[in-house]
Structure formats: structure tokens, C-alpha cells
Image (cartoon, grey):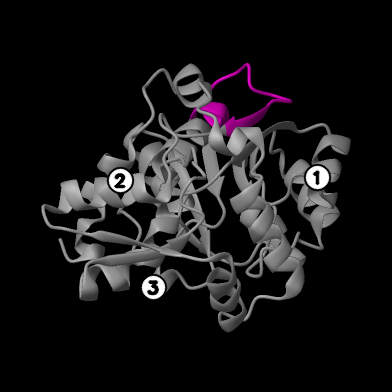
């Protein structure tokens, strides 16, 4: 079967393409600019955009399973959910994974269900790649400046999100499931910094910022008041799933989840390692 991966050059899409290809599946990767995709040999790279309904019949042609994202560049829900679902169903797609960007069901979620597709929803609590926000200060100063040092996060490796998607796309028993995905440990910001220091083999200091300093940083980055309220909630009263290690990744994939130390080893160059 041919499996379509949308967002194929993204944080989850790229490892998903690699894993499916390594397992011997035919993969069609959707990207806006194939010339810059840099995807492995053997992948059929298709030009297009999930938000552009007109290109979707051709994108879905011959596809039996698809990995979809439910949000656009600004992380807002896609507005053409019914068109996506219709194009997929008419092309004969039967099995779908959806990377969620919202706790609530979107128009895409509801349309996929209405068309009778076998859907599995993926809800990662936090990407380990969020730590790349610290890369510049670690590389240049050996420092991480962050607030709310007592709040743990059970962040998940992007390759584990991809592994759950690959399993759901290629094996049965996952239809209708919503998988909340975490890593194998819940770490506070100082604990993450300690891992960085250990893996990089040099001192990385943690400098605590106050609530007001964090708010000022977020405002300087261009975030609105609604965003700030959300960020504060996640830092001061995160949902239980965001700070609790769940067994979903090993249960679905049959393999232990990747640790933050492993992620740092894989991305050491970004931190000057």
C-alpha cells in the first residue's frame, strides 16, 4: 500500500517517512517545496498543501493510509476539514492518523469520522524538540534562562510520536483510539539542563526567571494575551497527562520510549556539542 505523510518535512513527519520507508512501505511525502525537502531516496515527493483542497484528489490518488495534521502554519485548525476528508474517502483511503493541535475535536476530526475512515488521534504532551529554544544561549553562554523550575514535563521524543503513527497506519486495532503520548520520564527545567550538561560534557547553568520576566519574554516574542494565559496555565497548573509518564508509546510500539538524554545526543550539534 502507499502511505501518505503530510507535513513530511516537519518534526514528526520526517522521522515518520524514514521509519515507514525503512520498514519497506511505499511512501508519498507531501511538501510545499519538493526541491528543498531533502527526503530519503525511494520516497515519492509530492508538491502540495493540505490546506489547499483543490490539489488533494491528486495527492490522495492511490493512497490507502495517510498521516494528517489538523493545524496550519499558525497552529490554528485547518478550515477545509470536510474537503480533506471527502478527498481522502473518495480516493479510497481507509486508515488515518491525525496529529492533534487542539484538545477539542476539529472540523477535520468530525469529517473523517463522518466519512467512515479508521482514525487514530495522536496527542503528544510536549515535544522534546522544544528544548531547541535554549540552543543559542547554551552554545554561546552555557546558560539556560527559564521560569517555573518546579513544574515537570513528560515530554516525548518526536521519533516516538512517529513510531506510534507508523504502527497505527500499518497494523490493525487502533481505529477510534486517542493516544496521549509522553516520554519515559517527567523532568523539570533544571533537570533537563543537568541532562544537557552531562551529555554535552560541559557545564550548563540554569538561571531562574521570575513570572514577570517570563511574561515579558513572551510579549517580546509577539505572543498575545490569550497565548500568555495558556502558557501560564501550562507552567503553573499543567494537565495531569503533561506531567505524568504514560505507557502508551511502549504499549503501542513494543519498544521503550526514547529518553531526553538520547534526544540531546542526537541533537548535540545544535547546542555546540
User: Which residue has dot 3 on it?
Assistant: 36
Tell me which residue sits at (33%, 42%) in the image.
260
Q: Earlier in the sequence, mark 1 or mark 3?
A: 3
Q: Horizontal and vertical percent for residue 257? A: 39, 29
Quarter of the picture holding the C terminus: bottom left
Q: Nearer the viewer, mark 1 or mark 3?
A: 1
**Residue 65, which numbered label?**
none
Disc 2, SS: helix
The CA span between labels 1 and 2 is 29 Å
Q: Which residues are magenta?
A: 167-180
- Residue 111 visible to the viewer: yes
The CA span between labels 3 and 2 is 25 Å
Q: Horizontal and vertical percent for residue 79? A: 81, 63
User: Which residue has dot 2 on it?
Assistant: 263
In the rendered view, tell whether residue 166 sits above or below residue 228.
Answer: above
Disc 1, SS: loop
| 27 magenta-colored | no
Amino acid at each position: 500500500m502507499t502511505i501518505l505523510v503530510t507535513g513530511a518535512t516537519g518534526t514528526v513527519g520526517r522521522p515518520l517517512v524514514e521509519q515507514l520507508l525503512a520498514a519497506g512501505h511505499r511512501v508519498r511525502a507531501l511538501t510545499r517545496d519538493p526541491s528543498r525537502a531533502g527526503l530519503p531516496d525511494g520516497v515519492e515527493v509530492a508538491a502540495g498543501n493540505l490546506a489547499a483542497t483543490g490539489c488533494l484528489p491528486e495527492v490522495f490518488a492511490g493512497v490507502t493510509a495517510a498521516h494528517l495534521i489538523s493545524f496550519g502554519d499558525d497552529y490554528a485548525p485547518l478550515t477545509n476539514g470536510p474537503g480533506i476528508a471527502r478527498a481522502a474517502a473518495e480516493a479510497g483511503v481507509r486508515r488515518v492518523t491525525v496529529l492533534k493541535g487542539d484538545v477539542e475535536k476539529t472540523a477535520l476530526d468530525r469529517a473523517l469520522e463522518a466519512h467512515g475512515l479508521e482514525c487514530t488521534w495522536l496527542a503528544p504532551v510536549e515535544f522534546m524538540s522544544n528544548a531547541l529554544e535554549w540552543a543559542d544561549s547554551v552554545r554561546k553562554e552555557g546558560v539556560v534562562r527559564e521560569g517555573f523550575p518546579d513544574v515537570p514535563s513528560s515530554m516525548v521524543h518526536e521519533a516516538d510520536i512517529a513510531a506510534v503513527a507508523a504502527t497505527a497506519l500499518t497494523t490493525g486495532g487502533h481505529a477510534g483510539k486517542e493516544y496521549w503520548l509522553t516520554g519515559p520520564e517527567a523532568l523539570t527545567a533544571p533537570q533537563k539542563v543537568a541532562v544537557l550538561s552531562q551529555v554535552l560534557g560541559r557545564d550548563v547553568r540554569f538561571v531562574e526567571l521570575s513570572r514577570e520576566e517570563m511574561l515579558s519574554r513572551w510579549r517580546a516574542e509577539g505572543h498575545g494575551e490569550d497565548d500568555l494565559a495558556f502558557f501560564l496555565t501550562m507552567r503553573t497548573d499543567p494537565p495531569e497527562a503533561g506531567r505524568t509518564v504514560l505507557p502508551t508509546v511502549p504499549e503501542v510500539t513494543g519498544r521503550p520510549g526514547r529518553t531526553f538524554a538520547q534526544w540531546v545526543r542526537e541533537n548535540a550539534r545544535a547546542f555546540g556539542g
